[in-house]
Image: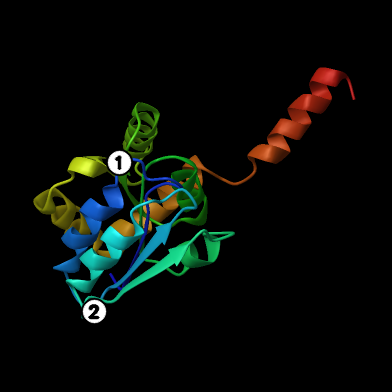
């Protein structure tokens, strides 16, 4: 692994990013750790202090990006809550770890994992170091990442809107 993208929701109500950052902080200083914060994130000063505790850990922080796609494509692994970003990662073939907040995110993370894409680690706000490091170490294997990438592209092919238009036209008799 050379880079990890962490995007734990537009708001991150539970503060999972604050939990994950120090867990990543003590792990492999040469790996790029990109933290993406949504417009509703309200723990900026606390996160800044946390990251400062790991000065040589290769952290970067981006706030309220228009699109995650370029960073997802440029990352070896995505850490997400299991919502839309999980679908985007799957479509792009970017392997993912899910640290969910809400029950529907857990369900989606588990469904994707059952389909061979990603790994559902549990609730982000209570994620333990051992579980995260084990998942990161497993995803260090390029062969495993390739298998996850292929499975993700099978699960989300990016052509859903085309199918929806066809179905709408059929339903309307067009």
Residue occupying the far front of the picture: 45
The residue located at (33%, 32%) in the rendering is 106
Residue 22 drawn at (x, y percent):
18, 61
Residue 64 drawn at (x, y percent):
51, 58
Badge 1 crowding class, 10 Å Cα cut-off, few under 14, some 14 to 19, many 20 or more, is some
Is residue 27 shown above or below 12? below
Which quarter of the rendered picture does the N terminus lie within? bottom left
Is residue 104 shown above or below 91? above
Q: Secondary structure at mark 2?
A: loop
Q: Secondary structure at mark 1?
A: loop
User: Would residue 66 be seen by someone viewing this image from the given angle?
Assistant: yes
Left or right of 133 on screen, residue 145: right
Q: Nearer the viewer, residue 98 or 40?
A: 40
Badge 2 crowding class, 10 Å Cα cut-off, few under 14, some 14 to 19, many 20 or more, is few
Is residue 47 shown above or below 159? below
Tell me, for residue 14, which label it has, or none: 1
- Quadrant of the rendered structure where residue 47 is? bottom left
Q: Nearer the viewer, residue 114 or 27?
A: 27
Which quarter of the rendered picture does the C terminus lie within? top right
User: Would residue 143 be seen by someone viewing this image from the given angle?
Assistant: no
State the residue position of label 2.
Answer: 30
Residue occupying the far left of the picture: 130
Residue 5 drawn at (x, y percent):
37, 62
Q: CA distance from mark 2 to mark 1?
A: 28 Å
Left or right of 162 on screen, residue 117: left
Left or right of 37 on screen, residue 69: right
- Give the mark, 2 or 1, whose residue is nearer the N terminus: 1
Q: Nearer the viewer, residue 66 or 153?
A: 66
Residue 153 drawn at (x, y percent):
49, 49
Q: Nearer the viewer, mark 2 or mark 1?
A: 1
């Amino acid at each position: 692994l050379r880079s990890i993208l962490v995007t734990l929701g537009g708001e991150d109500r539970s503060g999972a990013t604050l939990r994950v950052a120090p867990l990543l902080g003590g792990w492999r200083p040469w790996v790029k750790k990109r933290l993406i914060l949504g417009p509703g994130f309200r723990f900026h000063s606390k996160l800044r202090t946390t990251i400062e505790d790991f000065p040589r850990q290769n952290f970067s922080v981006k706030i309220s990006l228009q699109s995650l796609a370029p960073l997802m494509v440029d990352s070896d692994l995505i850490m997400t809550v299991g919502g839309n970003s999980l679908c985007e990662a799957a479509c792009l073939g970017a392997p993912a770890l899910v640290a969910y907040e809400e029950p529907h995110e857990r369900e989606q993370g588990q469904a994707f994992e059952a389909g061979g894409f990603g790994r559902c680690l549990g609730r982000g706000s209570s994620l333990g170091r051992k579980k995260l490091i084990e998942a990161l170490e497993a995803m260090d294997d390029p062969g495993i990442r390739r298998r996850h990438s292929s499975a993700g592209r099978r699960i989300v092919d990016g052509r859903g809107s085309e199918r929806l238009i066809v179905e709408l036209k059929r339903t309307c008799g067009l």
